[in-house]
Image: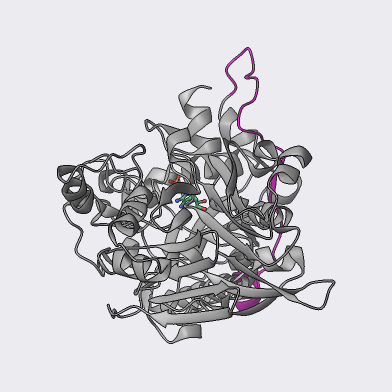
Amino acid sequence: MSESVSESVERTWKDECGVVGVWNNEHASRLSYLSLYAIQHRGQESAGIVTVDASGEHRVQKGLGLVQEVFDDVSLDRLAGRAAIGHVRYSTTGVNQMANAQPMQANLFNGPVAVAHNGNIVNANEIKKRLKEDGAIFHATSDTEVILHLVARHHSSNLVECLQAGLEELDGAYSLTVLSHQSLIAARDPYGFRPLVLGTLKNGDGEKSWIVASETCAFDLIGAQFVREIEPGEIWWVDASGEHSIKMKKKRERASCIFEHVYFARPDSIVFGQSVYGVRKEAGRRLAEQDEKEGFLKDVDLVIPVPDSGVPSALGYSVQSGKPFELGIIRNHYIGRTFIQPHQAIRDFGVKIKLNPQTSVLSGKRVVVIDDSLVRGTTSKKILQLVRAAGAKEVHLRIAAPPTIGPCYYGVDTPEKSQLIASSQSVESIAKFVGADSLRYLDLAGLKEAVQGQNGGYCAACFDGKYPTDLFGLDRNPKGHLRGIDA
Ligand code: AMP
């Protein structure tokens, strides 16, 4: 794939990870598979499921690729057992992808343990260095292996005690599902950076199964009922004696990732207690309100979203502004990971194969284009060029979030700071770069008001540069955030 094609279609950075867990269901592997399928948007590099079979042994299937590529009927049948955890991982480059595929497993003092992790542990390098000096052997480059090592160091037959002791040493973001031969555990860091939710499913025999997932859209697919969030700093587990919960000693102010609402999570999920769709629509409404107040609501003909990420916000903008909502850009949903390139260079082929602006809608029109976020500006630039080429007379870009000025160190794989266009350029010069007649962002106060659901408690470091944790030198790494930590 040429550079431009791979950049615009697959982008150089991707989503974070997604985790699931199932307890007490004869179809544990299939329910995990379906749940992973629902949260595939959180990671497309690898997928994996570990089950615990009747003899207490772990069974595992992991592979590179999408959920439907990694599992088939035969492998799901082989994953016998009534309990399971699963993981989808996002793309990175330059690291041994298979060694980093999750869940990660180890045979510890207290039996087989498997871990699936979403988030990024900021002090993993420090801990890894210390453990290596002490003789520990690491196989992967990701921070998740550190968790297994820390658990292994605490010699108690009570796995939850070992896990708690290990987790108290970590700083940063982790939403975990953990499977032993006796229990399913779910744990979330004291800041509550990444989402993690608990649900139940009625079994045919009148008993109930427990389901844990990164997002509630997984529950919808398998018919599970949402019970509650796993709380920040909570370790919840279920075993033969029922469900239990403890709180970690470390207390922190809640700092849930606001970017989950802006971009990552599926719009049909409830994240941090609030509908993602509702937040995005409200962000778009506020964007129009802000335009109105500041005298920037243009004399325009249409509001169009960048599909799919800008759709709910464009609806909100349209409702508030009274300007008609139109699908001015149509998205092809069947773009695979690779495709055969045309023999001759086609201008903007990489964007065109995915997004096709409609001349019949856009020709001669003054258009407001809405997207959820603007990171490097390169995608917007190409999209706006196409919109203009389709005949739009004026193109006004509106972003339903503030300018992205800082990389994420908590599990969102963002480009390094120097590539974040808003970290060094004014709104006017970004408008020029992307070729917009005007550009406006939703301000941070407006976005925070749109996520009122949990009364604050958000990390918005990508927008305000205020990182809730020490960064342990990660900010001095020229590559910005790297989830695959190679200490
Ligand atoms: P760009 O400004 O060209 O870097 O890309 C902005 C576009 O990328 C927007 O349409 C967003 O929906 C999308 N986007 C924002 N953050 C991410 C991310 N971490 N991974 C993938 N796409 C993203």
User: How far across and down, in percent of the image, does residue 252 sit?
Assistant: 29, 79
**Total numbered labels:** 0
Q: In this view, which residue lies farthest toward the top?
A: 343
**Is 307 on the left or on the right of 184, as rendered?**
right
- In reply to whether residue 313 is colored magenta, the answer given is no
Q: In this view, which residue lies farthest toward the bottom?
A: 455
Which image quadrant: the C terminus? top left
Rendering colour mode: one colour
- In reply to whether residue 322 is colored magenta, the answer given is yes
Give the residue drawn at x 64%, y 25%.
339
Identify whether 409 is placed above or below 269: above
Whether residue 63 is visible, yes or no, is yes
Identify whether 103 is placed above or below 179: above
Give the residue drawn at x 23%, y 57%.
123
Give the residue drawn at x 53%, y 56%.
18
**Is 185 on the left or on the right of 152, as rendered?**
right
Which image quadrant for residue 223?
A: bottom right
In the image, 267 versus 105, the foreground residue is 105
In the image, 393 versus 114, the foreground residue is 114
User: How far across and down, in percent of the image, does residue 204 sit?
Assistant: 85, 71
User: How far across and down, in percent of the image, does residue 67 sit?
Assistant: 65, 44
Q: Which residues are magenta?
A: 317-346
Identify whether 301 is placed above or below 414: below
User: How far across and down, in percent of the image, does residue 254 sit?
Assistant: 35, 78
In the image, 82 versus 382, the foreground residue is 82
Whether residue 429 is visible, yes or no, is no
- Give the dominant element type of the magenta stretch: helix, strand or loop: loop
